[in-house]
Amino acid sequence: MKINWKTFLSRLPKTTGALFAGLLATAGAVHAGDLFSISANNGTTVGGNNVVDLIDNAVNRSGAFATATAGNLNYAGVANAIQYTTTGLTPGRPYEITIPSTGLNVNFASTQELKDYLKKNGSDEIAKFLKAMAAQSLVAITDGNPGSSTARAASDSYQNYAMTFAETKEEKDGNKPNADRVGFGIIADVGRFDANGIRGEVYSLPLFARFKLTDRVGLNLDIPLNYTKIEGANAFGVGLGIGLPVKVIPRTKESPWYWQLTPFGGANATASRDLAAGGLIADGGLNSLLAYDFGSFTLSMGNHFSLHEGVPITVSSYRFDPGVSQQILKNGLKLDVPLGKRWIVDVYAVHTKFLTAAAVDQYATIGGEIG
């Protein structure tokens, strides 16, 4: 088993950070670490890490919102993401919701009608909203930042197929590379991030199985299990990936070169009640791994391209759509150095680029492993 520590170095928009910091500084009932806040027209600003409960209290005028009739929601650093009023101008339909990023403006007769709309008929609008938040929020769970579902799926694929399975000295001497073995395993992965003051932790436990079909073709199955804690909000993820690694230039004692191409596909489900976000996202693409063995160390280059599309699902008449349509490029280098007969140490750097709208359009991942 390998233990892997990562550091995300993100190129974050300074304006977003300044805006979020300003909101935290001026909000009376907002605490550092609150993902969401509502600024009401009675002068009260209330924060929290569960957007559903926060909106429910505001619309029902509970607690600090008792004398408030309207307000604006800050969603994970995105100001005025949703606007609401409980005294709308439409007779008999006083509840009004406006989402500036999608152009939505609807009226409701009761809070129950509002909930039914958001859970059923409003699924397309929610998908548009989540897509807009992914393009602006540094911590959206579906897309647009290093900790999102699309980025994690691309990262898992890259690690599996665009990074060398390094050989120990004993394996090199025996000419039995890891890639030729049938195996099952787990790679524990722990990370932390700080997105302009919003802090979180990521825990992953990817399960994998690798099978040899021929001397040059393999079949890999991967089941990534993820848990992300963003301030006080929780998000969970599970997926299934299938890869078909093909050795274009196989590794041999006679040649220092190695080249592998891997088409892959799969799906990931992510969900967070606290963020009122999630869904099923299908992905597919191609990885390339080119390596050169210098004898005392191995230098490799990995390249990755993937497509990620949200898949609407219906459960008990409720429709869920994550609103994702993304493409991701990853390019990186890795250095593997054997230690003794049975140990390996390596370091790597990977650049990631989102090709459609994203809050963090590109970032670098720097890491190391020993095993």
Image (spheres, rainbow, N blue to C red):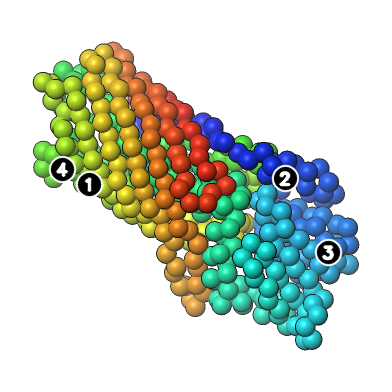
Residues 203 and 109: in front is 109
| Label 1 with label 4: CB-CB less than 8 Å | yes
Task: Name the residue at 46% across, 28% down.
Answer: 366
Q: Which residue is mark 3?
A: 65
Q: On the rendered structure, is 235 left or right of 111? A: left
Q: What is the distance, in whole Å, between disc 3 and disc 1 at their CAs?
A: 56 Å
Label 4 SS: loop
Label 2 SS: helix
Q: Is residue 369 above or below residue 330?
A: above
The reply to whether residue 302 is in sight is yes
Task: Name the residue at 32% across, 18% down.
Answer: 337
Amino acid type, label 1: Leu
Q: Which residue is mark 2?
A: 20
Percent across and percent down for residue 15 are 69, 42
Amino acid type, label 3: Phe
Amino acid type, label 4: Val
Q: What is the distance, in whole Å, between disc 4 and disc 3 at their CAs?
A: 62 Å
Q: What is the distance, in whole Å, between disc 1 and disc 2 at their CAs?
A: 44 Å
Amino acid type, label 2: Phe
First in sequence: mark 3 vs mark 1: 3
Crowd tier of the residue under label 2, counting other residues whose Cα lies within 10 Å: few below 14, some 14–19, many 20 or above: some
